[in-house]
Image (cartoon, rainbow, N blue to C red):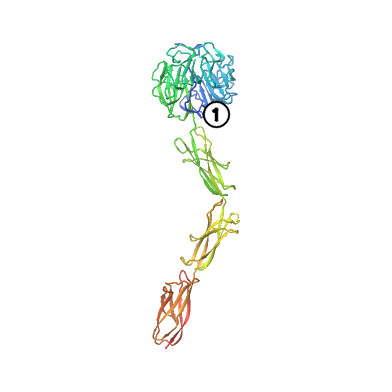
Amino acid sequence: MRTVQHGIAAIALLCAMVVSGLPAQADGSLWVWGSNVGDGTTSSSRKPVHIASLGTVRSVASSYNHTLAVRSDGTVWAWGMNDHGQLGDGTSVYSAAPVQVVGLANATAVAAGFYHSLALRTDGSVWAWGDSRYNQLGDGTTTSRAVPGQVPDVAGITAVAGGGVHSLALSSDGAVWAWGANNNGQLGDGTTTSRTTPVQVAGLTDVTAIAGGSAHGLALRSDGTVWAWGYNGYGQLGDRTNTDRPTPFQVPDLAGVIAVASQGNASMALTSDGVLWAWGHGVAGELGNGALADRWFPLPVPGLTGVTAIAAGYIHGMALRSDDTVWAWGWTGARSGGYVQTTPAQVRGVTGVISLTGGYMSCLAIVAPIPTAIHAVDRTGTISTSLTAKAYLRRLSDNAWLTGRSITFAVDGVPIGTSTTDAYGLAACDWTIGPGPVTRAIQVAFPGELAYQASSASATLTALTATKAYVVDRTAKLKTYVVLKAYLFLTSNAPLTGKPLTVKLDGTVVGSANTNALGYVQFGYVVAAAAGAGTRTIMADSAGGAGYAASSATGTLSVTHGDLYLWPYIRTGKAGTNHALRAYVRSLPDYVIQPGKTIVFSVGGTEIGTAAVGADGWATSVWSIPADEPAGAHTAHAAFAGDAWYQAVSVNTTFNVVP
C-alpha cells in the first residue's frame, strides 16, 4: 500500500458535489449529523441536527476537523478545530459553535482541506486561510494564517475544492488551477513539485465541475467525461492500476456524467440516467457495493436509482434521490458507535434537501424551506367600526394548515397588526376602519422561517361610509290616505341626497325612490283593511352602494278603526202586519259595500231583529207590528256594534204606524 508523503495520513475530506436539476445557489437551513455538528456541544448525533444559529445558508464544506458555511448574507462562518487558524477568526481557539470568519463578505462558496480553508467571492476571487505548511494557501509562502488572504494569480473563478494539503479552482473559461503539495502529482501539472502559487492543470478544457481527494483530483467536462490525476494507491483514478498520474487522463467506462465527488481515496460519478458509480478505497464500505474491498475501476452502486446529487466524506458516501430521500453508506465513525454500512441506507428525518456535503465523520444537508401559500379573505366593513381581517396559511407540499405561525396584516401598506394561526391555519386581526377610500388592499404576509418559505397575498377591503335611516311614525284610520315618510342620514346627521330608499309596510314594498335634497322620500298610501285596527310596521331600507353602507330603520303606523256609512230605509206600516226594516251599509271614505256585517234593528227601544248585510249592501229584518201597536210616529234604530275594522255606528229614523 502506498502512502501520501509528508506523514499526512490518507484520510479524507468532503469535496465538491453537484446537484443536477437544482439551482446552483439555493439557500436553506443547515442540518448536520455525525460528529463536529456545530450545535455548541462536542456530542455526536445519529439524527440530523438543525444549526438554527446560522439562519439560511447557500454553501457548506467540511473536512478532517472543521466545517465552513456561507450564510445567505455572504458572510462565512466556521466551527471545529482551529489549531492552524482554519476557522479564520484570527485565533487558534477551538469552537463548537459557528464563529464568523474575519473580513470576508460577498462569498458564494467554500471548500475545506485537512487544515486549511477556501472561499470564493462573487467577484471571482479566491481567499484562503489556515495551514500553509505545504503551500496550500497559494500565496507564495508556507506561512499559516488565521485570517483570510487573497490567492494571487487566479481570477474569474467559479468553483473551488479542497484536497488534503492542496487546493483546486475552476475558472470561467473551463480551466483548472491547483496549488499546494504535489508529491503524488495531485496538482496535475505533469510534475511532483509542490507549488506555492496556482498553476494550471495540464490539458484540461471545458471543465464544469471539480473535486479533490486526499491527494488526487477529478474534473468533469462539458461532454460528460471524467478526468482524474494524482495519487492512485487505492485505484481512485479508475484506470485499473495503482500507479500515480501527474497529468489528467480520461476515466474509462464513464459517459454522460453530470456530477463528481471525491472521498479521501475514493471517487464517485453520477450519470444522467440517475446511476451512481464509485471506485477506489472500499475497505470501510465507502463504495456502497456491499463489499469491503478496493475497486480500481468504476462500478455502479447497486440498489440506487433516480439519484440527483452525490457527496463524499471521509470514508462514507451520500446520495439524494428524486423522491426527496437521502441515502448514506460507509463507516459511521467511532464517536457515534461506529459500524460499517456497506450498502446505501436511508437517512431519516431530513427532507427537502437542496444539497449534500460530507465531512470527516459527518454529513451535512442544506434543506430548502417548504413552500407555503397564504390566502387573504375579502372583507367589507363600515368606517369607524371594527373589522376582522382574516388569512389562512398552508404548506404546499400536502396542503396542511400551518399552526402557530405569525402573520402580519396591513391595509394599503400601513401595518394594522399581527396574529398567530390557529389549528386550522387561520389568523384573524381586529381593526377599526379609519377614513379613506372605498376600495383598499388588505395585505397579509408570512415572513417565513428556517423550515418554511415566506408567502404573501392581498385581498380587497371595501370600506363603506355609515348611514342611518329614520322613519316618521304615522296614525291613520282604516282606508284613509296617509303619507309615509323616511329619511336617510350620515352618522353626523347630514342628509344623504340622491340615495335609493325603499319604504315597506309589514314587509310589503310601498315605494322606492332616491332621497331628495333634504334626504327623505315619501309615499302616499291608502290604509288597507288587512288585519284591521292596530299597530303596523313601517320600514325604511337602504341597500347601500357607491361607498355607503346599508342601513334600515322601523317606525309605526297606528291604524285606528274605520267608519261605516249606515242608511236606514224604514217607512210606514200598518198595525197587525209584517213590515221589512232595512239599512244600507258601506264603508267610508271609499263607499265599499260591507257584506256580512251584522245590523241590529229596534223600534221604540225594543230590539225587533238582526240581519247581515248582503251582497247588495242591504241588511233586512222583518217586524211583525203588533195589532195593538199605537198609531203614530215611532223611533226606529239601526246599529252596528263595531269590530276589529270599524267603529260602532248607529242611526235613528221615524217609523209611522198607521191603523
**Is 554 displayed left or right of 658 in the figure?**
right
Res. 9 visible in picture: no
Q: Which residue is mark 1?
A: 72
Q: Is residue 186 above or below residue 495?
A: above
Residue type beneath disc 1: Ser
Residue 659 drawn at (x, y percent): 42, 88
Residue 35 drawn at (x, y percent): 48, 23
Identify the secondary structure beneath mark 1. Answer: loop
Neighbours of disc 1 within 10 Å: few (<14), some (14-19), many (20+): many
Toward the viewer: 140 or 342? 140
Q: Is residue 19 above or below residue 138?
A: below
Residue 246 drawn at (x, y percent): 50, 12
Toward the viewer: 198 or 535? 198
Q: Is residue 193 above or below residue 485?
A: above
Task: Tell me where residue 148 sits by quadrant.
Answer: top right
Residue 497 drawn at (x, y percent): 59, 56
